Image (cartoon, rainbow, N blue to C red):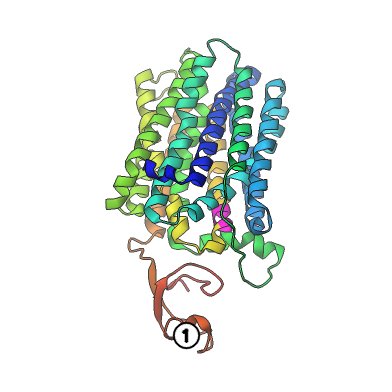
């Protein structure tokens, strides 16, 4: 897996991701404690709303950036968004009202919505070999898990000597270092797409149209719904559950670390697992595991969550971390299989936006139901959401999902270059939705 780090450009981008996410992990712990300081028992509801605002920023900004990514200087965009995030993180320690938290979260996540899909769409161009790209996806998942594992551990250590407000300074430093590493990276030249001029609406929705017309990606979206259900419960309610037990700030970080540790274990194993099992099998298994874990924790919970045994909570968070990684880590492989190079930025942006619709559903459920009806109800409601996602993935994602598909083009003239290049008539090739292939074969 580590051999991909021999590529200097990828190594710099990976280190940028790791360092930024360490800072983000500190902010995750600090934000939960800030919400608890301001709202006390309603901290879960505040976090749920703040994270829903984050999703609105993602859903609105990412498609616009993806649509016009080919017109923007990629390196400049990535560096600028890192610097914006660093500036916002410096302001967060000084807020003293809930509305201020909401405003700053919107600004911070709007910058992330521009940065993340642009960053993700760059990696397949740097690592065109599928096995190397799979290893990079697993490394990327490990980097994200630093937010849930190493960063909370670091936060727990720092909280013994400083106030949680100072953790936001670590976030800002992480984004600045990330910007410097991007600055020193030699990003590949982006090829201009040769296509007819499109209006703003069609250009903005191009990635979503490709996504929703590709059956395996509809399945990916359904699996993402299950993943969102599990992660929302962890992110929104960990601080409320642990504090409800009468435990310490360090225990909040330890519970988040258990979730991240499970995800890391799965990410380490996935390159080998994916050599023998199909993406569909692995990802739907993860969705089913999340549904089962949420339901089991819900049935074992009474009242506000303090009745959960501490070892049971840690074991539950660990198992959900494993399942979450199974759901989301292979997603980049599916996006790569389902797009040509020119359409990759808008498709990654569509995945970013559409997947966060799932979190927009899950975060308020986790926060509002947890605050109003207790943690048992929140666990069971999110188990139902995860179950719906697993069932939809089974139904909408074909078991047989080859790259090469037989199809014809009755709408094209016989001398069209695409037909002459494939001997005319019905033919096979790796099939993706694009200007010449607007519908999936057999879907009408």
Image quadrant holding the N terminus, namely: top left
* Location of residue 291 in the rendering, given as x and y in whole percent from the top left corner: 38, 40
Going 71% across and 23% down the picture, which residue do you hit? 95
Going 35% across and 40% down the picture, which residue do you hit? 289
User: Furthest residue to the bottom?
Assistant: 414
Q: Nearer the viewer, residue 121 or 279?
A: 121
* Location of residue 357 in the rendering, given as x and y in whole percent from the top left corner: 56, 47
Residue 347 in magenta?
Answer: yes
Going 55% across and 24% down the picture, which residue do you hit? 29
* Location of residue 252 in the rendering, given as x and y in whole percent from the top left corner: 48, 20
Looking at the image, residue 244 sits to the left or right of residue 295; the answer is right
Dominant SS of magenta comes to helix
Q: Is 432 rendered above or below residue 409?
A: above
Looking at the image, residue 161 sits to the left or right of residue 251; the answer is right
| Label 1 crowd bin: few (<14), some (14–19), many (20+), radius 10 Å | few
Report the residue marked by disc 1.
420
User: Furthest residue to the top?
Assistant: 161
Residue 351 in magenta?
Answer: no
Q: Give the range drawn in magenta.
A: 345-350
């Amino acid at each position: 897996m580590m051999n991909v780090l021999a590529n200097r450009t990828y190594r710099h981008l990976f280190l940028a991701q790791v360092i930024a996410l360490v800072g983000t992990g500190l902010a995750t712990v600090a934000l939960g404690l800030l919400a608890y300081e301001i709202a006390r028992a309603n901290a879960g509801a505040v976090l749920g709303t703040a994270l829903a605002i984050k999703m609105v920023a993602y859903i609105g900004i990412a498609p616009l950036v993806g649509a016009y990514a080919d017109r923007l200087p990629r390196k400049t965009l990535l560096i600028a968004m890192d610097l914006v995030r660093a500036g916002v993180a410096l302001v967060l320690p000084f807020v003293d009202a809930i509305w201020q938290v909401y405003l700053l979260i919107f600004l911070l996540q709007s910058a992330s919505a521009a940065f993340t899909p642009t960053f993700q769409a760059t990696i397949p161009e740097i690592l065109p070999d599928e096995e190397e790209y799979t290893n990079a996806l697993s490394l990327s998942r490990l980097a994200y898990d630093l937010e849930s594992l190493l960063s909370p551990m670091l936060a727990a250590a720092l909280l013994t000597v400083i106030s949680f407000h100072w953790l936001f300074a670590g976030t800002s430093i992480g984004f600045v270092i990330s910007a410097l590493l991007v600055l020193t990276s030699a990003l590949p030249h982006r090829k201009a797409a040769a296509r007819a001029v499109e209006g703003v609406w069609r250009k903005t929705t191009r990635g979503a149209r490709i996504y929703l017309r590709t059956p395996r990606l509809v399945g990916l979206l359904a699996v993402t719904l299950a993943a969102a259900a599990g992660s929302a419960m962890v992110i929104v309610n960990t601080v409320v559950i642990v504090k409800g037990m009468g435990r310490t700030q360090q225990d909040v970080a330890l519970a988040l670390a258990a979730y991240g540790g499970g995800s890391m274990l799965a990410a380490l194993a996935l390159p080998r697992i994916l050599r023998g099992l199909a993406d569909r099998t692995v990802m739907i298994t993860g969705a089913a595991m999340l549904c089962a874990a949420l339901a089991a924790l819900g049935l074992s919970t009474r009242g506000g969550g303090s009745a959960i045994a501490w070892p049971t909570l840690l074991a539950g968070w660990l198992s959900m971390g494993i399942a979450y990684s199974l759901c989301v880590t292979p997603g980049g492989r599916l996006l790569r299989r389902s797009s040509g190079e020119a359409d990759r930025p808008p498709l990654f942006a569509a995945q970013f936006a559409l997947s966060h619709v799932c979190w927009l559903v899950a975060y308020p459920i986790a926060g509002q139901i947890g605050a109003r009806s207790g943690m048992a109800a929140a666990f069971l409601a999110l188990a139902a959401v995860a179950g719906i996602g697993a069932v939809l993935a089974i139904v909408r994602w074909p078991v047989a999902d080859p790259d090469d598909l037989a199809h014809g083009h009755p709408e094209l003239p016989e001398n069209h270059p695409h037909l002459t290049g494939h001997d005319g008539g019905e033919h096979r090739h790796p099939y993706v939705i694009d200007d010449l292939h607007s519908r999936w074969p057999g879907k009408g």
